[in-house]
Amino acid sequence: MRGFAFYTRLAWQGITKNARVYLPYIFTCVGMVMMYYIVGALEDSSVVAEMRGGDTVQQILSLGELVVGFFSLLFLLYTNSFLLRRRKKEFGLYNMLGMSKRNLAWVLLIENLLVAALSLAGGLGLGVVFSKLAELSLSRLLAAGPSLVFEISLVAICKCLTLYGLIFLLLLANSLRQVHMARPVELLRAPNFGERPPRANWLLAVLGLVLLAAAYWLAATIKDPIVALLLFFGAAIMVIIATYLLFMAGSVALCRLLQKNKKFYYQTRHFVATGNMLFRMRRNGAGLASICILSTMVLVMISTTGCLFWGKDAALLQRYPQDMIFSVHNLYDPDNEDGSYYANRRQAAETYRGLIDAELAARGWRADNRLDFEYLEVAAFECEGELTFEAPGNEFAEMLQMPDITEVRFITVADYNKNFGMELQLAPDEVYVGENSRFPYTWLNLSFPQVEALPNYRVMGALPGLDGVLGSSEAVGRSLWVVLPDIADMQEICRVQRQVYDYYSFINWYYAFDLPAELKDDSEQSMDLVRSVWGQIEEMEQAAKAAGGDAPPPFHYDVRSAEKDWFFSMNSGLFFLAIVLALVFVAGALLIMYYKQLIEGYEDQAAFGILRKLGMTAREIRRSVNWQTLILFFLPLLMAGLHLVFAFPMLSLLIIPFGITDMALLTKICVCCYGAFALFYVLAYLITARLYYRIVTA
């Protein structure tokens, strides 16, 4: 018992005497536990579940919980190495005075228990307090009313205790391993060991440049959102590897080039700072690369999810262009050649239209901007006005040409005239195309080489009104509307396309309209209309089965007001999660800055003391320190900005499937995010640079 009290006193003294090292570490542990509890509590909250779209947000938060937990593990292992590096000299002294490795293990065990207890108690306490604030912030993002209910999530508390208990156990095991394997002399000298410059740094620097250039080339050349989604994570990994190589090897190469420049190197501030950076560049490079990657992640997350949040209204309109959309698929089946199949399906669509119109009339609702037509949608490969149905090979180079894949939608001229109040006429060998600002047509003829029964059409011009009719699928890739002379042409294309491509495409019926302003956001009344129509269709189906006839075709619907809650909650939930993760990553970057300045300040303290004795003035020391810290800490910020600039084309493609096509909005948000982050970064630099200067001049 007396021995335990002695070890406890040593452990507590070790923490208090090294408060400058331990306090930021403990605060970081507290912050990680707090954020993990908040995310877990919101995921488990009955208040959030009752919000509009709350279930969707909780599914998103479950993903965020995994990310926060995984990052906590990696980051605390990383920062614990800084702390252990500072304590090794103290442990070496204990070892030289007669304490065995087993005695040191007891001290480390008690230190970890104390830190774990403080972290878990503080983190859970602050988490419980601030979870309500986070809930109110989330309710504001979801446009839900605030709740006066205060909950403490036992599930989230158990998750925190389990996860961070395991993390602190791993930290203890890592500390014991390092102390056990080191000799006493190594422990005494550990804080003074510098990092050797990595070997073959020119080769690694060139490799980093090649990887970075390749990732930038991918981001700049890909034009299709689907390809961008497939290659985004690969490009991100290339950027991460390249960043580490450039900061670790490339920075050494840069320092050596600066040393060869005599006019630059043989100046007081440059001579000392360049030598310091070169001496420890491997550790500097890894830390700076980590800061750069974390900064880039914050900028990318906040920019993209912020764009989704502030552009959600326009995105909803893009996804659901009208208030109520009804459809019947598979009106025409080429495998049923007798014509009765098509006639019966069209008759069912007519019946559905009648039921909908009768419900509108019974409620006294006015249907505005009504659209009612049949269309065929096929995937084709367009090349100078030729549309073919063969898929290209699976080679990677050909996959990058996926922008040539075009979603082609066909409508008859009769349906176009009926819906848009026109009186156009087409000869059997003539077509119109729909206007498309993103992919304007540039050819005068349109042909289907595989459809021998159809002529080589002459394009008579572009028609308005069709762009955006079927929703956000048009924004994802290339799309083309074609107005055909007759329904028979559409049926022939459908038949041949199925034979050639072995892909089941159908002619579908589309019926959509807008509601009066007072009903646009009334999802309950809109869904009541749908339920009424659906009930009548089910009665028709049961009657057909009883009579031994064919069941009516499936009835599909989309109601914008009913989908709005889910859509907005998804965008708002992603933005909220991005804010939470950004806070975690920013805290990580800030702590890396702090520990780098702290540890390196202590390492350089003796060297600057010698320089002062040799005649170096306080002003020269300050200039040298400022130059060194400026180079070290602003390189990650500049590199993160460069990553964001080259990632912008790919980010603009990734948000298109979410219905965001306003690139001006994304540009503004990226610029504002970078400006705000740069301001925070400068403040962090000023604080940490002052800490370094105070240590080296002490």
Image (tube, rainbow, N blue to C red):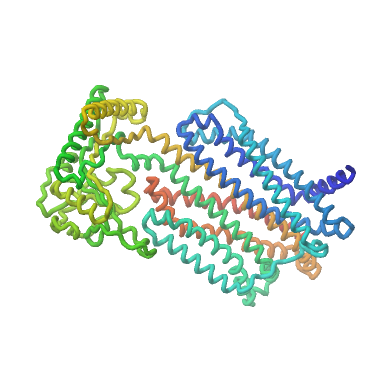
The x and y percentages for residue 454 are 14, 55
Residue at screen point 21% across, 35% down = 349
Q: Residue 691: tell me if it is visible.
A: no
- Residue 337 vertical position relative to residue 229 in the rendered view, above or below: above
Q: Residue at x 28, y 35 (%)?
A: 555
Q: Depth check: 135 or 339 in front? A: 339
Q: In the rendered picture of this protein, how many numbered marks are placed on residues?
A: 0
Q: Quadrant of the N terminus?
A: top right
Whether 123 is drawn above or below 500: the answer is above
- Residue 161 found in image quarter: top right
Q: Is residue 435 left or right of residue 163?
A: left
Q: Position of residue 585 (x, y in %)?
A: 59, 49
Horizontally, residue 173 falls left or right of residue 673, namely: right
Residue sitting nearer the eye, 283 or 36: 36
Q: Is residue 426 visible?
A: yes
Q: How far from the left and from the top, in percent, is residue 186?
A: 79, 64
Q: Quadrant of residue 387?
A: bottom left
Viewer-side residue, 481 vs 587: 481
In this rendering, is residue 237 above or below 310? Answer: below
Residue 664 percent location from the top left of the image? 40, 50
Going 78% across and 55% down the picture, which residue do you hit?
A: 87
Of the 4 image quadrants, the one containing the C terminus is bottom right
Left or right position of 478 against 183: left
